[in-house]
Image (cartoon, rainbow, N blue to C red):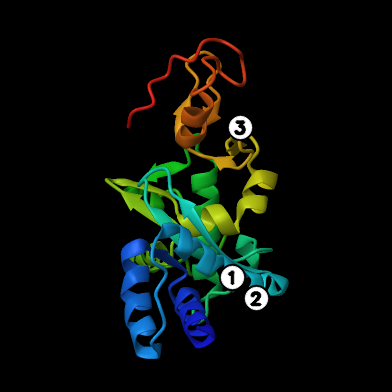
């Protein structure tokens, strides 16, 4: 099983962000090859990932599951725990291309609901006097790459912060965009979309408020009767 864990970790590092279908495509043949039992259910898979994370956390690395509120899908995300956009290493990219990554992250984080239209990813970008900003075709290629890596997420015609950005840049986002990046009043983790209280406009994770309202009927922030619909 240790060989399986090491090989699976390498796959997680290479892909950065995996949904359950991708996990199954990697883990099933890997377990068959080494004749070990694959984690039988979601709980066992979480324990499997946690056991791997325990071997890398001292290296400032993390392997954790998160549910993205926009898609409702759960992802397994490999991250560098002390990362900031200016420290991100993108092998083979120019300084201007790396700067484009930082510009996109900042542009998304500054929006109240942390998303922009797709065409805004290529317009009104301040490269601060750079003489050679990437051409639009190159920007499209980079955006596709970063989306595949989980840094950004496409839904409809909108672009959102992806699972890896939410996990990896949590401290950076909290510290630099306090006006738009909030924490859930119940679990204290980042809340970017989900639902808002009709009265006080506070964002709360849909799953958190559902659990909370099993025993209460008021908003945990303003105390008024909760009236926001929870269905998606």
Q: Quadrant of residue 137?
A: bottom left
Camera-nearest residue between 44 and 207: 44
Residue 51, which numbered label? 1
- Would you say residue 142 is visible in this rendering? yes
126 with respect to 137 (left or right):
right
**Residue labelled with disc 3:** 186
Secondary structure beneath dot 2 equals helix
Nearest to N terminus: mark 3 or mark 2: 2
Camera-nearest residue between 167 and 75: 75
Q: Residue at x 55, y 64 (%)?
A: 99
- Decide: marks 3, 2 in contact (CB < 8 A)? no
Camera-nearest residue between 91 and 40: 40
Q: Residue at x 43, y 73 (%)?
A: 15
223 with respect to 49 (left or right):
right
Residue 61, which numbered label? none
Q: Closer to us: mark 1 or mark 3?
A: 1
Q: Disc 3 to disc 2, how far (Cα)?
A: 30 Å
57 with respect to 29 (left or right):
right
Q: Closer to us: mark 1 or mark 2?
A: 1
- Decide: marks 1, 2 in contact (CB < 8 A)? yes
The answer to whether 177 is drawn above or below residue 60 in the figure is: above
**Residue labelled with disc 2:** 55
- Would you say residue 126 is visible in this rendering? no
């Amino acid at each position: 099983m240790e060989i399986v864990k090491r090989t699976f970790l390498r796959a997680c590092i290479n892909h950065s962000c995996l949904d359950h279908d991708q996990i199954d495509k990697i883990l099933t043949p890997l377990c068959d090859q080494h004749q070990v039992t694959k984690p039988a259910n979601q709980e066992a898979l979480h324990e499997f990932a946690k056991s791997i994370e325990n071997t890398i956390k001292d290296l400032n690395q993390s392997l954790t599951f998160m549910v993205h509120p926009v898609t409702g899908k759960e992802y397994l995300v490999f991250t560098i725990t002390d990362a900031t956009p200016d420290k991100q290493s993108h092998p083979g990219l120019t300084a201007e291309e790396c700067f484009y990554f930082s510009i996109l992250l900042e542009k998304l984080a500054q929006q109240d609901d942390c998303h922009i239209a797709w065409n805004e990813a290529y317009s009104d970008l301040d490269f601060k006097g750079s003489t050679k900003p990437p051409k639009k075709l190159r920007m499209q290629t980079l955006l596709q790459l970063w989306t595949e890596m989980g840094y950004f997420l496409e839904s409809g015609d909108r672009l959102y912060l992806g699972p890896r950005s939410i996990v990896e840049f949590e401290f950076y986002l909290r510290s630099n965009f306090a006006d738009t990046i909030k924490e859930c009043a119940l679990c204290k983790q980042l809340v970017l979309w989900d639902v808002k209280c009709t009265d006080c406009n506070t964002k709360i994770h849909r799953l958190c408020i559902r659990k909370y309202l099993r025993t209460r009927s008021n908003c945990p922030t303003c105390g008024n009767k909760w009236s926001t619909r929870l269905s998606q």
